[in-house]
Amino acid sequence: MNDCVFCKIIKGDIPAQKVYEGQHVIAFLDIAPTSPGHTLVVPKAHHENLITTPHDVACHCLDAIRKIAPAIVSATGTEGFNIGLNNGQAAGQAVFHTHFHIIPRITNDGLINWPHSKYKPGEAEKMQKLIVHALDSP
Ligand code: AMP
Ligand code: ZN
């Protein structure tokens, strides 16, 4: 993809702080980190989002995450990490080349996780049926 910023990083056309490179996946520091060490794990093949990413490519990304995330935690002296993936513009996806965020965390670091709400009576059952139906009739 000519105009994809992550393809340009993969090709070496623009610089990045690369922390890992394997046959199928690279990882580099996010240019605007949520916390120090925030890293993007990116398949070398261009796919727009997680749903259009083939199974084997997605599995390579997950394997890389399981390798890289503990190293980030160790290197940053943190205690845990969030994995994030924004799928679609409405979800905040800005770069349309599949990528996972690894965000190192420490207790009481001030970052706010997703807010929670409550279902009204009957709503959870209705939602469960809708999703099960959608899975049954793709
Ligand atoms: P998303 O909103 O999930 O599409 O995330 C895109 C991420 O890519 C953002 O967190 C950006 O800060 C990051 N980003 C954009 N351009 C670059 C770049 N040239 N090098 C490193 N990270 C980048
Ligand atoms: Zn790309």
Image (spheres, helix red, strand yellow):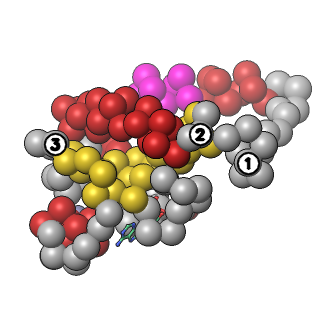
> Where's residue 79, x and y in %?
61, 34
> Is label 2 or label 1 in front?
2
Q: In which quarter of the image is residue 116?
A: top right
Foreground residue among 5 and 38: 38
The CA distance from mark 2 to mark 1 is: 10 Å
- Residue 22, numbered label: 3
- Give the residue type that dot 2 points to: Thr
Q: Quadrant of residue 60?
A: top left
Q: In this view, does 108 lie to the left or right of 51?
A: right
Foreground residue among 106 and 14: 106
Which element is circle 3 on? Answer: loop
Residue 82 shows in the view: no
Which element is circle 1 on? Answer: loop
Please tell me in which quarter of the rendered image ligand 1 is found. bottom left
Query: For residue 134: magenta?
Result: yes
**Tag count:** 3
Foreground residue among 135 and 80: 80
Q: What stretch is highlighted in magenta?
A: 131-137
Residue 63 shows in the view: yes
Q: Residues within 10 Å of mark 1 (few under 14, many from 20)?
A: few
Q: Earlier in the sequence, mark 3 or mark 1?
A: 3
Instruction: Tell me which residue sits at (82%, 25%) in the image.
Output: 122
Circles 3 and 1, Cβ within 8 Å, touching? The answer is: no
Query: For residue 27: magenta?
Result: no
> Which residue position is annotated with label 2?
78
Instruction: Tell me which residue sits at (88%, 26%) in the image.
Output: 121
- Residue 75, numbered label: none
Assign the N terminus to one quadrant of the image: bottom left
Instruction: Tell me which residue sits at (48%, 53%) in the image.
Output: 37
- Residue 109, numbered label: 1
